[in-house]
Amino acid sequence: MPTTSEEYRPVPLHLREPIGLQTPWTHNFEDLAYEWRRLLSEALGTFLLVLVAAGAPVVDAWSHGQVPLDAQVVAPALMVMAVIYFMGTISGAHLNPAVSISFALRGHFPWRRVPAYVAAQFAGSLLAAAFLRGMFGNIGNLGSTLPGGNTTWWQATVIEFVLTAGLVSVILGTASGARNIGANAALAVAGYIALAGLWAAPVTGASMNPARSLGPVIVGGHWQDWWAYVIGPLAGGAVAVLFAWALRGKPSKAADKAARGLLPGA
């Protein structure tokens, strides 16, 4: 029969059993020994996002119109939901430089880790764009997000600004309860992406993500008004942080865990 001290002796971190979707090393976000897993997770997740988001218009062009616009905007939303489910507890499933920077501005994520996260996201986007070009050629503008119709560069910038402010507000709002790694956030974020795309895709492509936009632009060489898809989302994310301060006050510890891929109670 174990004594009281033996019964409640803490188990070393490396010997703990996995808890739910979480593995023992993820409980210590400061442990850089497994940072490569977090970065791989961001790169893989962004690869899959761009593969679908840019791949839909590419395959539409390749198949002569077999992927309608509503499918093109819903597909990346569903992919984001799937990625949050399978890797949210590893890296936090940012998948977007605007999200990583906004988490840092809000105080949920350390600034020193942002450059590596952003680099991993861009790497995933570039690989996805290169894969699409290798498979189908440089068709359908390689899925680049470009202003549509009579949309000017400043209109595209403002629309991306507004769309991203809404997206990051949803992400920060669900993270406030450490839910961006659970069903609530996966559904909320995916729903927002789909709804934004359903009305704004013909105007700007509804990117809301510099990594998603710049990967196909760099690989495909379609540089038209590319800055709108950097300035707009980054500014929109920053404004969403101001909204979070106004609506919820100081950052919560629960949201810190959500931004870092930690389950509640970890």
Image (cartoon, rainbow, N blue to C red):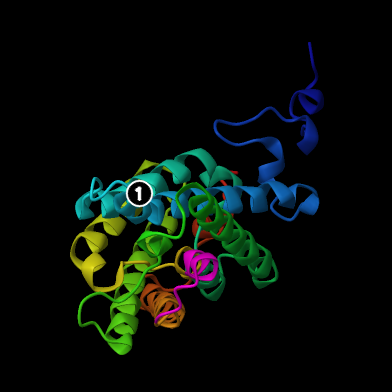
Residue at 34% x, 54% y: name it: 189
Q: Rate crowding at label 1 as few (under 14), some (14 to 19) or many (20 or more) other CA atoms within 10 Å.
A: many
Residue that lies at the very extreme toward the top in this rendered image: 1
Residue at 66% x, 44% y: name it: 26
What x and y, as percent, mark residue 45?
53, 49
Q: Write the start and end of the magenta stretch as one range.
A: 214-224
Q: Identify residue for label 1.
A: 59
Which quadrant would the C terminus be assigned to in this image? top right
Say what amino acid the circle numbered 1 marks. Val
How many numbered circles does the render carry? Answer: 1
Residue 242 found in image quarter: bottom left
Residue 250 visible, this orientation: yes
Residue 258 visible, this orientation: no
| In-front residue for pair 10/188 | 188
Figure check: 56 above or below 122: above
Which quadrant would the N terminus be assigned to in this image? top right
In magenta segment, residue 22: no
Residue at 33% x, 86% y: name it: 153
What x and y, as percent, mark residue 49?
45, 52
SS for tag 1? Answer: helix
Residue 19 found in image quarter: top right
Residue at 78% x, 54% y: name it: 32
| In-front residue for pair 248/92 | 92
What x and y, as percent, mark residue 112?
70, 70
What x and y, as percent, mark residue 17?
69, 27
